[in-house]
Amino acid sequence: MRQSQWFQPDMARPVISVVIPTRDRCTILRLTLEALARQEGVDGTFEVIVVDDGSTDGTLEMLRTSDFSTFDLRSVPLEHGGPARARNWGISEATAERILLLGDDMIPAPGNLNIHLAASGEPERGVLGMIEWDPEHEITDVMRFLAPEGPQFWFKGLEEGSLVPTTSLVSANLSAPRRWFLEEPFDESFTEACMEDTELGYRWWRRGWVIRFRPGAVCHHRHSYRSIEPFLERQRRAGRWTRLAVWQHPALFATLVARPVALAPLLAARTGLRFLGGRGRRDDVWDLHCRWKFVTGFVRG
C-alpha cells in the first residue's frame, strides 16, 4: 500500500524536486541526504522525495527520525517494483517544475543543485552532471577501468555544454523539466537498474529534447569494486535488459549491440598481440570479459 509522508513542510513552492529511489541502503542514503543539506548557492527552497522500494533495513525509520532543516523531506514507501517504478512515483509526488534524479549512493558536491538549477532559465533543457568515484574511499584499478571512461559510466569526449548521447545517459545525476518525465515516464517493465535510463533517453531524443553535460555538477559515487567479477554479473543483466530495449526500439540494435559486438574480434586480436609482445594490459582483458557477458545476457535473456 502506497503512503506519502511529509516532513518539515514549507509553504513556499520549491525551486527543484530531488527524487531518490532506494532499497536497503540506509547508511549510504543518510550520507547522500546530509550532502544535500550542505548544498551551497541554492536560491530558494527545495524538496527531497525518497521513494523506498521495499527496504527491510530500517530505511523508513531513519527517514522518520531525520531532521534536515535546509530542505523539505518526503518519504514514499512502496512494495518492491524496481527503480523505474520508484522514480515515476517520486516524480508524481514532486511539486517543483524541475526534477533532479539522484542515486542513493551518489554524494552530491556542495554546488551540484545550483548548477542543475541554472538550467531552469532554459526550461526545455535537460542536464547530466558528472559522476566520479568517492575520493574518501580507495579507488581500485577495477574502478578506474569502469569509470569515468568505461563500461559503467562513459563520459569520454563530453565537455561543458556537450550534447549527451543516449548511450551516456544515466539517471543518477540527471535533471530535466517535470513535464518531460510526465509525458515520457520511465518504462516500468524494466524492473532492475539496467537500461531503463537508456531507453528513456532514446524516447526523449526522438521528441527532440536536448540534454547537455555540465561537469561541474559532480556526484561522488560511493561504491567499491575490488575485482571485476561483481560487475560482470551486472553486464550480463544489462545484456538481458537490452533485449527488451531493442525489442521496443529496433533502431537501438546498431548502437547497443551490433557496434560493440563488431569491435570485439578486433579488440581480442589487439589484446593477443599485446600479450605476445609482453605489453598485455588487464584493462583489455576486463573489456573483453565485459563484452562477452553482455552478449551472453543478450542472447540467453
Image (cartoon, rainbow, N blue to C red):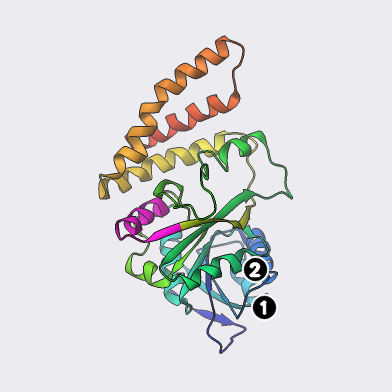
Residue labelled with disc 2: 36
Residue 192 x %, y %: 43, 52
Q: Split into 4 quadrants, where in the image is the C terminus?
A: top left
| Residue 135 appears in the rendering | yes
Residue 121 x %, y %: 49, 73
> Could you tell me how many numbered marks the image carries?
2
- Indicate yes or no whether the magenta region holds residue 201: yes
Q: How far is the residue under mark 1 from the one under mark 2?
A: 9 Å
Assign a secondary structure to mark 1: loop
Along the line of sight, which residue is nearer the eye, 268 or 84?
268
**Is residue 96 positioned above or below 241 on the image?**
below
Which residue is rendered at x = 43% and y = 71% of the image? 123
Which residue is rendered at x = 40% and y = 50% of the image? 166
Q: Split into 4 quadrants, where in the image is the N terminus?
A: bottom left
Identify the amino acid type marked 2.
Leu
Which residue is rendered at x = 52% and y = 45% of the image? 155
Extent of the magenta region: 195-211
Q: Are dots 1 and 2 in contact, CB under 8 Å?
A: yes
Residue at the extreme top: 276
Assign a secondary structure to mark 2: helix
**Is residue 198 positioned above or below 271 on the image?**
below
Residue labelled with disc 1: 70
In the image: residue 161, left or right of residue 296:
right
